[in-house]
């Protein structure tokens, strides 16, 4: 277990077990007393609709005196059976406190305009109140959406916040404006000395990778676009990412980031620049990154014992790739962690086993 992750989990568990509270904002911003919001049920006349699919919280869309709100209520027992799932409500209240500070800080003006404002949050009451954001999960991907997302994620990383869960259910687009509103798996870190909230141990993880892993490659799997269209989108994503990563590198360098962190960013950017240099280089990078993202996301779902039809599709993709492209994937460094050094037969057996596990952990309704 990573020491930084362990320390963060222990601190959160200790906070949860203590009597301490964390409150964001003023109760006077609430249209009803916080205690009434905490006990509100979906049967209440203020409730317009509910989102009960969440694993750690219930989300209610409220309308009170003509004003629309989003009320997130903590579940008594999180449906994700791991520590990060169980502490994700506390984690989100902590991040709401961070964003409330950052949004008010002139040094960061405008850089968190895609982060939902928090009207009020109270950890012990188990409530987070935000404005209701009309809109839907993105259905179309384009350079503008990539730009809104990565500019925000890079601002978060520069400010020392690493978002891990950029899945489709955590993004909303309202008339072209992207909103982020779920911070259950966003963790603080020191961007001058660490790659991400795991410290220096996992260079694989960063904003663009998180979007590719939790959203982009899964979305492509469900769209069945021609390969040319997939590569065109991937090219746009890399172009946008390069711009924002260059900005992040300059920001961190100016503030004294250690050489390790700067070299890591330089290497990532060099790889993408090389991919953008020719169609064949782009296709090679796409193959490696699609495989990497599916492998990583499968582990996320299995770890949380929360699998869906897309988890099964990802496993099938990985099996196909291992069957036909094992040598290229091994040579390109796509076999890492538990997959490192394994031969083709052992990997195929491993993923057949993962498929069985995933079938046993399909979430209700999937
Ligand atoms: N401010 C908001 N405006 C509009 N819709 C929202 C807002 N916040 C949440 N939603 C809707 O509610 C759904 C669930 O919200 P959210 O992602 O915050 O919680 P969750 O996924 O249930 O929690 P967790 O990720 O901790 O399991 C979202 O997918 C979105 O459709
Ligand atoms: Mg969510």
Image (cartoon, grey):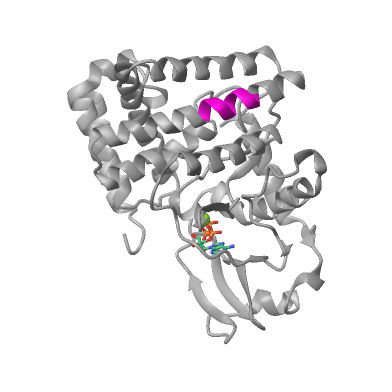
Q: Examine the rendering and report whether any part of residue 64 can be seen.
A: yes
Q: Residue at x 37, y 35 (%)?
A: 233
Tell me which corner region of the image, top left, top right, bottom left or bottom right, holds residue 342. Answer: top left
Most frequent secondary structure within the magenta stretch:
helix
Where residue 187 sits: x, y (%)?
64, 41
User: Is 199 placed left or right of 275 in the picture?
Assistant: right
Question: Toward the viewer: 168 or 356?
Answer: 168
Placement of the C terminus among the 4 image quadrants: bottom left
Tell me which corner region of the image, top left, top right, bottom left or bottom right, holds residue 215. Answer: top left
In this view, the residue farthest toward the left is 324
User: Is 221 placed left or right of 216 in the picture?
Assistant: left
- Relative to 152, residue 285 above or below: above
| Image: magenta residue range | 241-248
- Relative to 201, residue 308 above or below: below
Q: Is residue 245 magenta?
A: yes
Question: Toward the viewer: 199 or 72?
Answer: 72
């Amino acid at each position: 277990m990573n020491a930084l992750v362990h320390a963060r989990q222990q601190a959160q568990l200790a906070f949860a077990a203590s009597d301490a509270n964390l409150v964001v904002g003023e109760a006077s911003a609430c249209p009803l007393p916080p205690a009434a919001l905490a006990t509100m049920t979906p049967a209440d006349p203020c409730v317009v609709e509910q989102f009960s699919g969440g694993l750690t919280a219930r989300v209610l869309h409220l309308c009170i005196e003509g004003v629309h709100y989003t009320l997130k209520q903590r579940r008594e027992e999180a449906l994700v059976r791991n520590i990060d799932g169980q502490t994700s409500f506390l984690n989100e209240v902590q991040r709401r406190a961070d964003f409330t500070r950052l949004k008010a800080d002139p040094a960061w003006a405008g850089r968190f305009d895609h982060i939902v404002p928090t009207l009020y949050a109270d950890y012990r009451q188990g409530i987070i109140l935000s404005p209701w954001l009309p809109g839907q999960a993105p259905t179309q991907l384009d350079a503008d959406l990539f730009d809104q997302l990565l500019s925000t994620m890079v601002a978060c990383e520069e400010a020392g916040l690493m978002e891990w869960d950029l899945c489709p259910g955590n993004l909303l687009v309202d008339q072209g404006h992207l909103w982020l509103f779920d911070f259950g798996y966003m963790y603080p870190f020191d961007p001058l000395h660490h790659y991400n909230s795991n410290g220096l141990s996992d260079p694989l993880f960063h904003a663009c990778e998180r979007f590719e892993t939790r959203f982009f490659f899964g979305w492509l799997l469900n769209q069945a676009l021609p390969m040319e269209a997939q590569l065109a989108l991937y090219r746009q994503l890399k172009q946008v990412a390069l711009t924002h990563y260059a900005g992040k590198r300059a920001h961190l360098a100016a503030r004294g980031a250690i050489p390790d962190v700067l070299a890591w960013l330089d290497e990532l950017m060099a790889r993408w620049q090389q991919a953008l240099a020719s169609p064949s280089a782009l296709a090679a990078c796409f193959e490696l990154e699609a495989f990497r993202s599916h492998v990583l996301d499968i582990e996320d779902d299995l770890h949380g014992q929360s699998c869906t039809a897309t988890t099964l599709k990802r496993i099938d993709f990985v099996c196909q790739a291992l069957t036909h492209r094992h040598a290229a994937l091994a040579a390109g460094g796509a076999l890492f962690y538990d997959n490192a050094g394994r031969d083709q037969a052992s990997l195929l057996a491993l993923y057949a086993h993962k498929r069985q596990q995933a079938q046993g952990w399909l979430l209700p309704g999937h």
